[in-house]
Every structure is written in C-alpha cells, then in structure tokens.
Amino acid sequence: MSRTGKATDVLRRVVDDAMIFASLLVLAWPVFFDDLGRPGTTVLDRAWPVGVVVVFGAVVAKVSERWPLARYAPAFAAVVIAAVMHSRTGGAGPELTWLIIVVAAIVLVRQFLGARTNEGLIRDLTRQRAIMARQAFRDPLTQLGNRAMFINHAEDALGDADETMTAVIIVDLDGFKDVNDTYGHAAGDELLKTTATRLNANVRANDTVSRLGGDEFVVLLPRLVDDTIADTVADRILRDLLQPLVVGDVMLSIRASAGIAITRGSGHDVDEVLREADQALYQAKAEGKGVARRFDPELFARTEKRRLDEAELRRAFAERQFEVHYQPIVDLDGEHTVGVEALIRWRHPERGLLPPAAFLDLAEELGMLPEVGHWVLQEACRQAVIWQEHTPGFELNVNLSASQLGNPALCDEVREVLATTGMPAQLLVLELTETVALTDLGESARILGSLKALGVRIALDDFGTGFSSLSHLGVLPVDVVKIDKSFVAAMRESGGASVAEAVLQIARTFGLAPVAEGVEDAVQASRLRELDCAQAQGYHFAKPMPADELTDLLVRQAAVKS
C-alpha cells in the first residue's frame, strides 16, 4: 500500500473512534449531562459520566474490529434519541443540538474517507493484478516471455496464419551446465540475460521470444511469406550468440544449437509444432552442435520408429514375450539328435514370430543382451536337464554376445545357472563368433579360460569368416569349431570340398571337434560324411523348434532306436 493510502487508513480509524465517542455522548446526554450545570455539582459528578462514555466507546471500538457495522450503531441510536427528545420536548437544548451536528459531520467525513479508501484499494488491487499478470507471462530472470506467453502467442499466430507460414525456432545453449559448474550460477545467469538480449535484437517487433526453461529459448516468427527467412534468422542468432561476452574477469562465448519447425496455414497444434522443433534440435546436437537444422519428416519417422521399437523391445522382455527355440545337432552317422543349439525368438503380439536378426542388434545397442542372454542360458539349461533324464549325454549349445563376454559377472552368472538348474557343466557348450573373440584376443582368452575352469566347453562359431589365423586357435581355449554355412554351400558350387575340407583338417590338427552348420540337403550331408565330419545342423535335418516339438522328436527317435 502507498504512503498516502496508509495515512488515509490511519485518519479513517481516528474518525471512526471520534464518531463512536460523539454518538455515545449524544446517547448519554439526557441521562448524565442535563443536571451538570446546576448548583452543587461536584467534579466527580462531572467526571464519572465521561468515564462511562469512554469505557463504552472503547468496547464499541473493539467490537467494530470484528464487526465493522457496529461502529455505526451509536450514531444510529443517537439520531433516534434526538428524534424522540424533539418529539417530547419540542426540541433539544443547544448543547445537544451542536453535538448532533458534530456526529452528522463526522459521519459525512467518515463516508468521504471511506470512498477515498475504496478508491485507493481499487488502485492497489488493479496494480497488484497487473503485476501478477506480468509475472504469469514473464520470466523473472531474463524478462522475456515464459512458456505460457509463448503458447498464448503461438495459438493466436497459428489460428490467424491464413496462407502464410509460421516458424518456431528452439535455441538451446551448448555446454551451459559446464559454465554453471565452472564459473558459478551468477555467471550462468549473466549468460542467460545476454542470450535474451541478443535474441531480441535479431527478431522483428511482432515476433515473440520466450524462455522455455533452463537454457532453452524459443522464437516465434508469424506470418512468413518465405520459409528461408526462418533459416536466416536462426543462423543469424547463432552467429550473434558466438560473440565474446565478459562476465567478471572471464571471457565467454555462447555456443548454441537450434531446431526449426515451419507450418503453412492455420489449424496446427502448438504442442505438435514444438515437438517438431525439438526433434530438429535433437538432430542439430547429434550432428555436432552449434548448427541449426530444420525438422525432417522422414528422419523423424525413422527416429520415431526406432523409439517405438525400443519401447516394444523393453516391454517384450518385461512381459516375457521371448521364447527359446532349439535346432537339433545330429550325429551324421545315423542322423540322430545328440544335442541342440538354443536360439531366441520373439513372439510379437502383432508381427508374429521374429528371428534374432530382427531385434538382437537393437538389444545390443540398448545394453539389454547381458540380461537377455542370461535368461536364455537359464531357460535353456532348465529344459536341457529335462531332456537329459531320458537322453544321457545330451549337449546344449548357447550363444554368447560381445556384451556378455565383456560382462565382469559372466563367470559368476554361469556358475549360478549351473548350480540352480543342475545342468552338468561338461554338457554345456558356450558359442561365440570369431569376430567377438578377436575383438580383444588376450581378454577373450582370459575370460574363456575362466569359463572352462567351470567345466563348460567353448565353441568358435562361423569359423573361417573372421580373418582368424592358426595362431589364434593356439591362444583361445576352444573345444569345438563350427564350420560356417557359406563353406558348406560352396562344396556344391565348387564340385568338391575345398575350404570345408581345409577347415576340417585344421580342426583335427588342433584336436577340436568340428560341427558343420547350414546343411540344406542330403548331398551336402553325404559329402560331410565322406570328409569324416562327425556332427552337423541345418534345415536338412530340422528347423529350430519350440521345446515341446523337440521333445516329440526325441521320443520318436528313441522309439526308432529301440
């Protein structure tokens, strides 16, 4: 409240008290004061009526603090008493008449002050509302508009665009957190204020600049007739922001990235345009920061698909949509199943059964493979133990990914699975590709050595495709080599054994057990027998299948053997 308003309020309180006491004097006059002028009246006779008036006046003043209308009760009663006396006696004495006039004057003054006070209150309320409205739409640090103001202006611009274009530019400061951490929040605040000033200097009078929060700003360019204007403004802003800024004793430069979204015509949603500008900003930062990029619908579609795929994959694991299928590994002498390779599948609720190639790369990028791989190992070992009850010596092959091999807890996890499932360690074969094994040969050899110490066996998958040399086989503690299907297929094309035969010879030289992959027909199986390859797998023998189908296959094979 202003000083004038405070003074008026004090004066109003004084007048209120005067009105109360004057009114009480009017009421008390006929009872206490008519005889005061007679001979023999003492000082006490004159004082005690005044004391009574003062006490009653104080009581009324106190009561009026809670019930404001109470202050008018004595004045009302005084007027009534005056009217009664006038009707009975034909008029009041001069003293009482003047007292009534004083009460009336005080009431008038009180009403005048009340009106002035009300006007002051209205002015104060109006001023407070204006301040609150400003705060509701302004950022207190930079004095720019805030998100609420931007939304308000953007809705108006998009609703009134007609055939013109509207551009939204999101500007984000690169490395702002480092400035705060290194030079303090005061330096960061100065950086934000300077950014606001420079943004305002690079736009038109009818454009809107707002601070969305933190180090993120937004520029609204309404009613554009040329879409390149938005690119020009964004580039100009980024160049201007790069100009050096001195904060205290430190010289800083403001490096920023910008994302641009442009719409044509009316009817567009503000949130949608902001999302597009934000997506363009994300692309600008992905390209090295310090640049402005427009929203690209095709790129957004790819990014959105990737986001949905990630969400689906995480939900699939949480909801156990994955399954383990098993491809038989057969003994070529009799073609009966002696083991299986565990292969993960995704039972997608809409797309059906998906092979590993459809999701494992994404799972690797998301860091999910150690967890997924552990689940496959546990599930496959649990199932293999059931088959081993009826098929002694039945082997289980499980693949290891690069991220699993780099997991420090891998050996402990394998040990725990062997213990909880009862899987014999010597019947578990852990497979990894040459590419994975050769990423860090020394570290791979150490980890594989730790796994072999548990009693499990190690297989080198896709042997011959990873630019390996014979020296690697001497370093890696490998028990099994799996001949890549491309070499098996080449036997038909070359009319002979060629590379497959050489790989088999290498395996024998190093005392390794060979398994041929991707056997598609009887001709390939027959040629592998001629080359003394003991085991093979492929669609010629059986496709990967669920556990219950493999159980039926084992039962049929057992019935034939018996």
Image: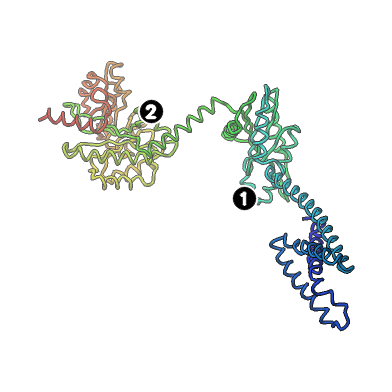
Q: Is residue 102 above or below residue 422?
A: below
Measured as percent of width and height from the top left, residue 143 is found at 72, 44
Q: Is residue 451 left or right of residue 403?
A: left
Measured as percent of width and height from the top left, residue 494 is found at 30, 16
- Res 255 quadrant in image: top right
Question: Badge 1: how crowded within 10 Å, few (<14), some, or many (20+)?
Answer: few
Tally of numbered tags: 2
Q: Type of residue at label 1?
A: Asp
Q: Is residue 304 left or right of residue 170?
A: left
Of residue 205 and residue 269, the one placed in the foreground of this image is 269
Q: Is residue 280 left or right of residue 361?
A: right
Q: Residue furthest right?
A: 94
Q: Residue at x 82, y 56 (%)?
A: 113
Q: Residue at x 26, y 34 (%)?
A: 512
Q: Type of residue at label 2?
A: Glu
> Mark 2 = which residue?
350
Rounded to the nearest whole Å, what is the CA distance between mark 2 and mark 1?
A: 48 Å
Measured as percent of width and height from the top left, residue 490 is found at 31, 19
Q: Is residue 438 above or below residue 484?
A: below
Q: Is residue 491 above or below residue 325?
A: above
- Res 373 quadrant in image: top left
Element type where label 2 sits in the image? loop
- Res 437 quadrant in image: top left
Of residue 418 and residue 430, the one placed in the foreground of this image is 418
Question: Badge 2: how crowded within 10 Å, few (<14), some, or many (20+)?
Answer: few
Q: Residue at x 84, y 60 (%)?
A: 104
Q: Is residue 287 visible?
A: no
Indicate the quadrant containing the N terminus: top left, top right, bottom left or bottom right: bottom right
Of residue 369 and residue 102, the one placed in the foreground of this image is 102
The mark found on residue 181 in the picture is 1
> Foreground mark, 2 or 1?
2
